[in-house]
Amino acid sequence: MAALGDQSEEQAMAAQPKPQNRPISNIVIVVGTLRLLWFPQGVPWVRYQGTYKDLNISLIWPGKDPTLGVDSVGTISSALVTYAAIQALQPDLIINAGTAGGFKAKGASIGDVFIVSDCAFHDRRIPIPVFDLYGVGLRKAFVAPNLVKELNLKVGKLSTGDSLDMTQQDESSIIANDATVKDMEGAAIAYVSDLLKVPAIFVKAVTDIIDGDKPTAEEFLQNLAAVTTALDLAVEQVINFINGKCESEL
């Protein structure tokens, strides 16, 4: 199965939109864990909107599943709401803020906040030449070296799948992807933002240690409240840094 490293750095970078030399003014934040008139009737998606300093900010949440009443997690809902938000709001930048599992073998600890450098899938297995690369779906996240340096955040690669647990096949793909953190939406949002040429920054806070000794679901729920508080603070710092800057200054 092809992995992140099988696509050259030059190929991945060439697909990225060129930075705009004008201040960022319109941001969409997609959260994974607000209803809009311009969303199709019947969808549970929700939007909160406001201004902060020189920024127009829209916080978008996929909402609750209409049938079961649980949060609409996973790649499908995240991709759909990201596409709709970009089409309607025409943002200069996407920020995907969410929680993730982390690997202690790659230096992750509970409460760590990562800026993602690369996104890929670990559960789209298509063992046919070229289709295997499509399945992995490598995409570079928006490079923001000044932001990382200023906020002293960790940087790591992200692997995305639609399951909270991890099968042996998933684990092999995640290792091949050289991932430090694992989530259920990032690579799907990266696909949409790349398709529509809107830069995306991924901010991920670690709720559970995948290669630890505690059950994933138990550890996730135990740490969710405290870690989302840390995530909120990190996103606030990111927004403060972005305010008044051009893409090329990030």
Image (tube, rainbow, N blue to C red):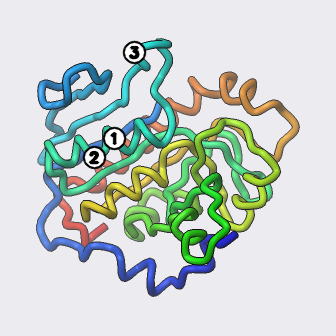
Which residue has dot 2 on it?
Answer: 83
- Seen in the image, is 37 located left or right of residue 34? left
Crowd tier of the residue under label 3, counting other residues whose Cα lies within 10 Å: few below 14, some 14–19, many 20 or above: few
Horizontal side of residue 75 vs 79, given as left or right: right
- Residue 99 in the image: state x and y as whole percent: 55, 39
C-alpha distance separating marks 1 and 2: 5 Å
Q: Is residue 129 shown left or right of residue 230?
A: right
Residue 210: image tag:
none
Which x, y percent locates residue 84? 23, 41
Amino acid, disc 2: Tyr
Rendering quarter of residue 5: bottom right
The reply to whether callout 1 and callout 2 are in contact (CB within 8 Å) is yes
**Label drawn at residue 66:** 3
Q: CA distance from mark 1 to mark 3?
A: 15 Å
Q: Circle 1 — which element? A: helix
Q: Is residue 47 above or below residue 52?
A: above
Mark 2 or mark 3, earlier in chain:
3
Residue type at numbered disc 1: Leu
Characterize the local packing of mark 2: few (<14), some (14-19) or many (20 or more) Cα atoms within 10 angstroms. some
